[in-house]
């Protein structure tokens, strides 16, 4: 979108490190985007059709009453969080994340890298659970999502920045940076305008989500965690507007597979090339829905295979704990005894019997090197399925 540059002089701190080149004042220009609350525009017919196709695909993904709805939501949210973190250079695979989540559920320590992605999952849960449900999206909700994401990692978690930040260039000053976001004194007003924009319903939901995300990244309101919070904002809006009330399409998976195109799209937005940016998001949404549909089919097939294995094995009564546990396995890439007891509502002896029957049938694979009191299992084939599906994601994102 349009905006203006404000010219500033960088004054290095007296304790600044680096060579003399970086310890002297220098000139830079910060970009202040225009407010967008009252923005309007006309899109090319072909792009409007592409965006409508993408929205229709997201709506088709929502199938109320589908028994796989909750497991699918959990799986796709993890995939979204993994990919959103990967865009920022945080590399954790699906198996490490699942094991970290299981450890965290029982109060055990989690490695630093995995903890960042677990925090991203928790921030996404807050985003689509609470922030998407409030009557009016406000600054407090955005700060809350950021606070959950960056808690324990950033001293200013949940706080808008009070210093100048920048993208690219060097670590010492913004002079020569690829992009300098607005000065800190402009941030709160721009965020309030963004919230006003998000509370409107004057444009299609996917268009609104795409513009809100790009404007958020342009403002870059936090010291760190901007990208992950901004991508969560897209999901807040898709849920608020009723586009994705149940299943969250993992758009970040598509964006992570075409990171350069995604970054170039954000730059295009700042250069007032809205059509190019919206084309990228339309393509990403379509690709993410295709992935989600493959998830649904593959998980349904895997669940049927597990059911047959259990029938061929212990074949317990229809109301046995083993069947209750089996139905929930797609939501738990790593499962422990406490998880099974909680969601099944059965006694510990019944749960232990069910877990043993599932293990004997080859449905649960025990994770080795654990004490008997802390046993965990991986549902057979589930994590491999997740990794395989995401590796097959198409990489092309088409600009409008």
Image: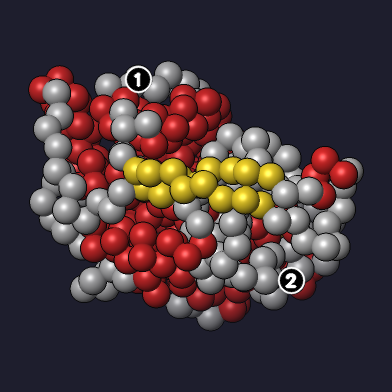
Residue 258 visible to an observer of this rendering: yes
Q: Position of residue 93 (x, y in %)?
A: 65, 42
Instruction: From the viewer's side, name the closer residue of 245 and 127.
Output: 127
Crowd tier of the residue under label 1, counting other residues whose Cα lies within 10 Å: few below 14, some 14–19, many 20 or above: some
Q: Residue at x 26, y 27 (%)?
A: 275
Residue 279: which quarter of the image? top left
Confirm or deny contact between disc 2 and disc 1 (CB under 8 A): no
Q: Residue at x 19, y 24 (%)?
A: 47
Give the secondary structure at mark 2: loop
Q: Residue at x 82, y 40 (%)?
A: 21
Q: Compared to 33, does 134 lie above or below?
A: below
Q: Position of residue 58 (x, y in %)?
A: 24, 40
Crowd tier of the residue under label 2, counting other residues whose Cα lies within 10 Å: few below 14, some 14–19, many 20 or above: few
Q: Is residue 353 left or right of residue 207?
A: right
Q: Quadrant of the C terminus?
A: top left
Q: Which residue is mark 1?
A: 398
Depth check, mark 2 against mark 1: the one in front is: 1
Q: Position of residue 367 (x, y in %)?
A: 74, 53
| Disc number placed over residue 108 in the picture, else none | 2
How many marks the image carries: the answer is 2
Residue 322 visible to an observer of this rendering: no
Q: Earlier in the sequence, mark 2 or mark 1?
A: 2
Q: Is residue 388 left or right of residue 171?
A: left
Instruction: From the viewer's side, name the closer residue of 115 and 7.
Output: 7
Q: Residue at x 74, y 71 (%)?
A: 108
Q: Position of residue 74 (x, y in %)?
A: 44, 54
Q: Compared to 312, does 335 lie above or below?
A: below
| Disc number placed over residue 236 in the picture, else none | none
Q: CA distance from mark 2 to mark 1?
A: 44 Å
Q: Compared to 210, does 271 lie above or below?
A: above
């Amino acid at each position: 979108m349009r905006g203006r540059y404000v010219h500033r002089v960088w004054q290095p701190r007296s304790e600044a490190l680096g060579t003399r080149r970086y310890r002297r004042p220098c000139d830079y220009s910060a970009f202040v985007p225009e407010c967008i609350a009252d923005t309007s525009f006309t899109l090319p017919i072909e792009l409007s059709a592409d965006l409508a196709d993408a929205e229709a695909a997201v709506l088709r993904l929502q199938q109320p009453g589908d028994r796989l709805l909750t497991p699918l939501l959990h799986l796709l949210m993890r995939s979204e969080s993994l990919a959103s973190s990967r865009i920022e250079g945080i590399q954790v695979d699906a198996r490490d994340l699942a094991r970290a989540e299981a450890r965290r559920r029982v109060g055990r320590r989690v490695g630093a890298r995995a903890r960042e992605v677990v925090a991203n999952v928790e921030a996404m849960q807050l985003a689509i659970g609470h922030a998407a449900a409030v009557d009016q999206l406000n600054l407090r909700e955005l700060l809350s999502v950021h606070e959950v994401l960056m808690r324990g990692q950033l001293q200013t978690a949940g706080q808008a920045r009070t210093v100048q930040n920048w993208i690219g260039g060097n670590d010492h000053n913004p002079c020569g940076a690829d992009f300098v976001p607005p000065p800190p004194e402009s941030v709160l007003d721009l965020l309030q305008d963004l919230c006003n924009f998000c509370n409107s319903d004057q444009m299609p939901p996917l268009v609104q989500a795409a513009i809100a995300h790009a404007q958020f990244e342009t403002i870059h309101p936090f010291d760190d965690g901007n990208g992950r919070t901004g991508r969560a904002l897209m999901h807040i809006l898709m849920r608020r507007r009723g586009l994705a009330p149940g299943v969250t399409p993992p758009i970040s998976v598509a964006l992570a597979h075409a990171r350069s195109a995604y970054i170039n799209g954000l730059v295009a937005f700042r250069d007032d090339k809205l059509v190019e940016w919206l084309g990228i998001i339309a393509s990403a949404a379509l690709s993410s829905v295709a992935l989600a549909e493959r998830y649904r089919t593959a998980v349904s097939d895997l669940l049927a295979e597990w059911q047959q294995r259990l029938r061929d094995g212990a074949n317990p009564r229809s109301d046995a704990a083993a069947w209750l546990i089996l139905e929930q396995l797609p939501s738990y890439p790593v499962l422990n005894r406490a998880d099974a007891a909680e969601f099944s509502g059965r006694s510990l002896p019944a749960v232990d019997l069910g877990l043993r029957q599932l293990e004997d049938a080859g449905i649960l694979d025990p994770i080795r090197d654990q004490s008997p009191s802390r046993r965990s299992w991986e549902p057979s084939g589930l994590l491999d399925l997740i990794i395989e599906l995401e590796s097959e994601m198409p990489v092309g994102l088409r600009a409008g």
